[in-house]
Amino acid sequence: MWLKNHWYAVLESNEVQKQPVHAERLGEMLVFWRDDQGVVHGQNNQCPHLGASLSQGHIKNNCLVCPFHGFAFDTAGICQHIPANGKAGRIPPQMRDKTYPTQEAHGFIWLWYGDAEPHTQKVPFFEELSPLTYGTLTDQWPVHISRAIENQLDSAHLPFVHHNTIGRRLSPFIQGPYVEADETGVKVWNFQHLDADKQLSQQELKGHINGKDPALDLRFPGIWRLKISAGFYQFIAFVPVNATTTHYYLRHYRNWKVPLVDGLVSKALSFSNRLILNQDKRVVCAQSPLNSAEAEHEHLIGADRAIAQFRRLVRQLAT
């Protein structure tokens, strides 16, 4: 259903403060909390005793304490205290909660999903964004993550879905796009400046790149960036809530600030992003089936080359 053995962005860092936080992610009911050193931990939200919601509990002595009977679970999910059994009472070895490896980086909490050990896998990100200022807006769509991602790899929809915003001056004719794809993700170069009616080959288009960065860059399992200009980018972390729901963290990154009114500039950019995102949402949420892996009846065209590569790689990485 989702790619295994990858780091997924699951929450923004500021969403996990002093109190435990519940979040459904990857079809699992999870709880995230910070220990006494501020390190974030993720584990199953259901207490292994009687299934109470651990996110309603509190943190004490570096343990997550269940609100129902006071069972205390350490950062490894092992029960350290059962009040009803007394201080010297036996703790059953099976009284432990499932935990997930987590990292905090780039303003996100990342969760490792899979069977392999995550130690050799770096959290995916776009290093060119790290030093830049950003603002965030969030949304949640009733679609599988595959449809959400494919929408952001698709350039052909812009003159139609966004006919009165970002696609207003774009030609419906798509030259290419030129696409490079491997197990790390999909890169897309668009060529709006090439107005020829004849479709150029991938090799011919490669000659027009001239060292330019890709306009669209997807990193598995689910982060995407759009380069608008030097020092100005759009970014999305696609977070799988469950099989029918995807949470969006949409950020605008910029290398410039406007003294005195920078907050207003950030709000204006977020307002514009919300408008454009809602145009996409209306169309994408009506696609069927929700999961593009089940869309065997669909017939792709040349302009869908990035989507085709994405589907190919998902099939390959899922085996």
Image (spheres, rainbow, N blue to C red):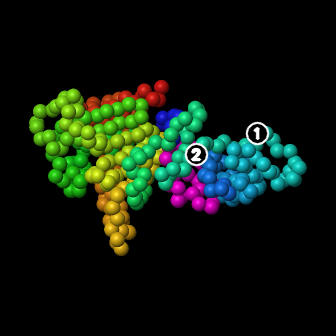
Q: Residue at x 70, y 45 (%)?
A: 77
Identify the magenta region.
8-33
Please say whether residue 216 is one of the residues in the magenta stretch.
no
Residue furthest to the bottom: 260
Question: Of discs 2 and 1, which sits in the foreground?
Answer: 2
Taking the image as shown, residue 281 lies to the left or right of residue 76, namely left
Residue furthest to the right: 88
Task: Identify the element where label 1 is drawn.
Answer: loop
Residue 98 drawn above or below residue 82: above
Image marks 2 and 1: residues in contact by CB distance under 8 Å: no
Q: Residue at x 58, y 32 (%)?
A: 116
Which amino acid, by three-letter code, is at mark 2?
Thr
Residue 16 drawn above or below residue 318: below
Taking the image as shown, residue 26 lies to the left or right of residue 152, namely right
**Tag 1 residue:** 94
N-term mark: 2 or 1 = 1
Task: Identify the element where label 2 is drawn.
Answer: strand
Q: Residue at x 29, y 42 (%)?
A: 213
Which amino acid, by three-letter code, is at mark 1?
Gln
Crowd class of label 2 (few under 14; some 14 to 19; many from 20; radius 10 Å): many
Main SS of the magenta part reads strand
Taking the image as shown, residue 100 lies to the left or right of residue 79, namely left
Q: Position of residue 301 (x, y in %)?
A: 24, 32
Crowd class of label 1 (few under 14; some 14 to 19; many from 20; radius 10 Å): few
Q: Position of residue 211 (x, y in %)?
A: 26, 39
Residue 174 visible in the picture: yes
**Tag 2 residue:** 102
Q: Position of residue 266 (x, y in %)?
A: 36, 64
Q: Position of residue 52 (x, y in %)?
A: 69, 52
The alpha-carbon separation of the residues under discs 2 and 1 comes to 23 Å
Taking the image as shown, residue 128 lies to the left or right of residue 101, namely left
